[in-house]
Amino acid sequence: MTARFVQDGSGLTGATAAELAEKIHAKEVSSKEVTQAFLDRIEETNVELNTFLHVDADGALAQAEAVDRAIAAGDKPASPLAGVPLALKDLFTTTDQPTTAASKILEGYRSPYDATVTKRLKAAGVPILGKTNLDEFAMGSSTENSAYGPTKNPYDTSRTAGGSGGGTAAALASGQAPLGIGTDTGGSIRQPAALTNTVGVKPTYGTVSRYGLIACASSLDQGGPTARTVLDTALLHEVIAGHDPLDGTSVDRPVAPVVDAAREGARGDLKGLKVGVVKQFDRDGWQDDVIANFRNSVETLKGLGAEVVEVDCPHFDDALNAYYLILSCEVSSNLARFDGMRYGRRAGDDGSHTAAEVMAKTRAEGFGPEVKRRIILGTYALSVGYYDAYYLQAQRVRTLIARDFANAFENADVLVAPVTPTTAFPLGEKVDDPLAMYNFDLCTLPLNLAGLGGMSVPAGFDESGLPIGLQVMAPAFADDRLYRLGAAFEAARAN
Ligand code: GLN
């Protein structure tokens, strides 16, 4: 089954970013033509898929023309991706487009500054097509928590494209954009990638600037690249990663050589690489064809020469509880700034209310139910008398999970696991059952608690034709290993 929205690999909108860049830089096609082709595709399909919350045709075309002029003048392209357009998750600030975080509370907000990621994209000559849909403030696993309606999966429009970054993922899968930027706090890049047959990478914490990324949970959030191929994702990774003095948690060290690793992986085999299969995530009871696909993927890795070992990460079973506690605590603090005074929407501003009433009314009207649930949970968990029992305990579990990873990496260079327990679920299925929604993240969130890098790479389809991803995880600052394995796996599947 292939929905009519899935791009077919033909024409400009089906090409990879690397191919488009090559053609643009060789003047075989202009960036303007390429950008226009994607804008047309968005125009045709956005009403049904609900991927973009805002489309900036003028801004994208102006950037494309600037790149074309520079190339015509004989200048070296500003970056390997100069002229290739991109879909930006609407959680990064932009001065020339609205930034909503898919929340009503930011209605009418215009940021006075660009996020560092936005700035780097602009400096790299990447036209930004628009801002994509997400779960409100990135809280959710299906984009159904967006104040602007859910994104639909191009493979089956009755199903979710994942979340929180479903908008970007569905844009890639449907040929609306060849490149995208997401954020991953507990899986929001990897999970939508898995559900849409696209590639998504959560880089090591601290390697991509969070400056101008609207905070969900600051100790977990990380922006990252998404695309339809491993090489395209690597090219984008090198554009956005690197030290930023404006982000206090940004690390000052060279970016891992991810493009070289992707090229090497695509050419070579995996001899000498030790791959750990996480025992806790290789289990019966999840969707049969997802588990069968995972085991099959492991065989593919063996066929490429990798040595496969089993690794035991016993505390991963507690990751979900620790994650949702820590996340809610950070959310309750981070979202205090949306008070109707400083950003976006203000309710009850008719002169008859006190400031406290305006704040309460703005927050009551502006936040959706999931955001409120987490603010209340986090505020409760942090209150005097409960701190030790909840927050402190969750932080201890976090340490144990980091140790599980450290032990596993003594026996393996990379780890692999499924990304999700099932393929894309029907819209509406979990939206009234928060715990079922949270449970969908159990394979992706341990990585965020440990601050490491991970990838979802397409691994095939289930019996109904819905995409499945393979998750790869690497030690801190070794994101290049994700790309080496990912590219070798991708090439092996193509053959
Ligand atoms: N689904 C997870 C959550 O709701 C992850 C979200 C994310 O990575 N932003 O917290």
Image (cartoon, rainbow, N blue to C red):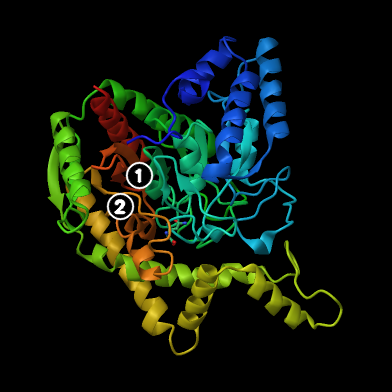
Q: Amino acid at mark 2?
A: Thr
Q: CA distance from mark 1 to mark 2?
A: 8 Å
Task: Tell me which image quadrant ligand 1 sits in.
Answer: bottom left
Disc 1 within 8 angstroms of ligand 1 (CB): no
Image coordinates for residue 295, horizontal then vertical, percent: 15, 43
- Taking the spot 69% from the left edge, 27% from the top edge, the residue there is 61
Residue located beneath label 2 in the image: 420
On screen, 208 above or below 460?
below
User: Left of 466 or right of it: where is 251?
Assistant: right
On screen, 398 above or below 238?
below
- Taking the spot 41% from the left edge, 26% from the top edge, the residue there is 8
On screen, 246 above or below 123?
below
Q: Nearer the viewer, residue 21 or 105?
A: 105
- Taking the spot 51% from the left edge, 25% from the top edge, the residue there is 13
Element type at mark 1: helix
**Res. 120 image quadrant:** top right
Q: Is residue 234 visible?
A: yes
Farthest bottom residue in view: 385
**Res. 481 image quadrant:** top left
Q: Nearer the viewer, residue 214 or 65?
A: 65
The numbered mark at residue 194 is: 1
**Res. 442 image quadrant:** bottom left
Crowding around mark 1 (Cα neighbors within 10 Å: few <14, some 14 to 19, many 20+) is many
Element type at mark 2: loop
Instruction: Tell which circle, 1 or 2, labels the residue nearer the N-terminal end.
Output: 1
Image coordinates for residue 384, horizontal then vertical, percent: 49, 88
User: Left of 458 or right of it: where is 66?
Assistant: right
The quadrant in which the C terminus is found is top left
Disc 2 within 8 angstroms of ligand 1 (CB): no
